[in-house]
Image (cartoon, rainbow, N blue to C red):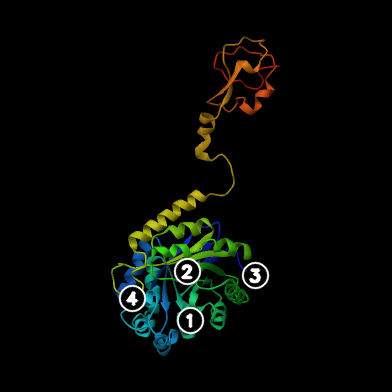
């Protein structure tokens, strides 16, 4: 199995050494309005997103009206929908005549534009406009479609919500057989926005993925409120972050309630950038902003009383006190001076330096 430890989207490197790449999933939050879709692109850019992602589905290509009606009562987040599953999806469809318009709008805004496609025709229509594809968790077992996307030769972001490890492995194997540019994303596909969902996010799966696929680019597709999971994921190595984005959480629609808004998204990115700065290189060293502290907070070996040249030093004459000039004898070196004869006069409180005894 071959895959790249670093991928590029529109020339932007994405790897463990790079800042997290934030994808604002606009999904159906455009409410079927082209001008709203355009506004969301600009709002996402202003809030710090690196990419906007739409969802290219047609109701009759993604859900079975008959199947959901036979299933009975709507469950989970769908229970709050005022209309049937099929009708809700139909109203949330992305107008594919917008492809070129929104791709150009994104270009003008300076933000990457791509999608989660849900049928073969969508891929054919959108391919020339997008630098990457996202595979939604619900399609992780649709290997024929996964292969088709992988063969497009563009980075593939694979969400792995509501799946087990063997299902993840099959999908990864399918992608990497044709395409080395993969982002493997932990995900929990509960869209209710309830606080209890935090116990199911299982960010430690990212560590499992890192062991199973060393150096593979990892990510998080998240639907929890706030940004706690995002910070945790970045700390565990995720470098692609996807969350839903809306202009206003109070709007009516399937995704608005659990989406981030311009204010919360901006705060999330700001906190993430702080975290990235704090994570550092992993190399333990005296940092640039600690150079004064080395002197101010460390202890030096000092004389308790004034001592003339020729004095033979003993432990009772010495103590360890701050500060510690860089040429000082440090406490762990004190045994080197015990029993030695001073070559210089020392005033009470002076620190000892190498070369001052014989």
Residue 221, given in percent of the width and then of the height, sits at 47, 67
- 4 or 3: mark nearer the eye: 4
The answer to which of marks 4 and 1 sits earlier in the sequence is 4
The count of marks equals 4
Q: Quadrant of the C terminus?
A: top right
The answer to which of marks 4 and 3 sits earlier in the sequence is 3
The answer to which of marks 3 and 2 sits earlier in the sequence is 3
Query: Is residue 31 positioned above or below 305 on the image?
Result: below
Q: Is residue 330 visible?
A: no
Mark 3, residues whose alpha carbon is within 10 Å: few (<14), some, or many (≥20)? few
- Disc 4 to disc 3, C-alpha distance: 43 Å
Mark 4, residues whose alpha carbon is within 10 Å: few (<14), some, or many (≥20)? few
Q: Residue at x 34, y 62 (%)?
A: 262
Q: Is residue 233 visible?
A: yes
- Disc 4 to disc 1, C-alpha distance: 31 Å
Nearest the viewer among 278 and 35 is 278
Q: Residue at x 35, y 61 (%)?
A: 46
- Disc 2 to disc 1, C-alpha distance: 25 Å
Q: Which mark is residue 188?
A: 2
Nearest the viewer among 349 and 102 is 349
Nearest the viewer among 110 and 80 is 80
> Badge 1 is on which residue?
123
Q: Secondary structure at mark 4?
A: helix
Q: Which mark is residue 2?
A: 3
- 3 or 2: mark nearer the eye: 2
Q: Which mark is residue 80?
A: 4
């Amino acid at each position: 199995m071959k895959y790249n430890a670093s991928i590029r989207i529109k020339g932007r490197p994405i790897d463990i050494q790079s800042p997290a790449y934030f994808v604002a999933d606009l999904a159906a939050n455009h409410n079927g309005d082209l001008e709203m879709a355009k506004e969301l692109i600009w709002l996402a850019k202003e809030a710090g997103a690196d990419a906007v992602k739409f969802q290219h589905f047609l109701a009759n290509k993604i859900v079975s009206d008959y199947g959901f009606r036979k299933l009975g009562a709507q469950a989970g987040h769908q229970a709050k929908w005022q209309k049937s599953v099929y009708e809700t999806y139909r109203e949330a469809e992305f107008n594919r005549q917008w492809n070129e318009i929104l791709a150009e709008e994104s270009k003008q805004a300076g933000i990457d534009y791509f999608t989660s496609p849900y049928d073969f025709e969508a891929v054919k229509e959108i391919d020339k406009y997008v630098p990457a594809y996202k595979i939604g968790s619900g399609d992780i077992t649709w290997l024929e479609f996964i292969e088709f996307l992988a063969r497009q030769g563009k980075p593939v972001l694979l969400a792995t919500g509501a799946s087990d490890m063997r299902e993840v492995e099959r999908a990864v194997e399918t992608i990497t057989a044709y395409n080395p540019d993969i982002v493997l994303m932990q995900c929990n596909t509960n869209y209710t926005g309830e606080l209890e969902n935090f116990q199911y996010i299982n960010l430690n799966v990212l560590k499992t993925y890192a062991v199973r696929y060393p150096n593979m680019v990892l990510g998080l597709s998240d639907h929890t409120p706030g940004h706690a999971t995002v910070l945790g994921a970045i700390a565990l190595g995720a470098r692609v972050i996807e969350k839903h984005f809306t202009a206003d959480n109070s709007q009516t629609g399937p995704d608005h309630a659990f989406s981030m808004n311009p204010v919360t998204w901006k705060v999330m990115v700001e906190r993430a950038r702080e975290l990235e700065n704090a994570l550092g290189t992993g190399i333990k060293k005296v940092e640039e902003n600690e150079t004064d502290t080395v002197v101010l907070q460390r202890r030096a070996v000092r004389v308790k009383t004034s001592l003339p040249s020729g004095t033979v030093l003993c432990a009772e004459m010495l103590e360890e006190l701050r500060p510690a000039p860089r040429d000082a004898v440090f406490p762990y070196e004190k045994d080197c001076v015990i029993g030695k004869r001073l070559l210089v006069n020392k005033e009470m409180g002076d620190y000892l330096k190498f070369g001052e005894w014989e």
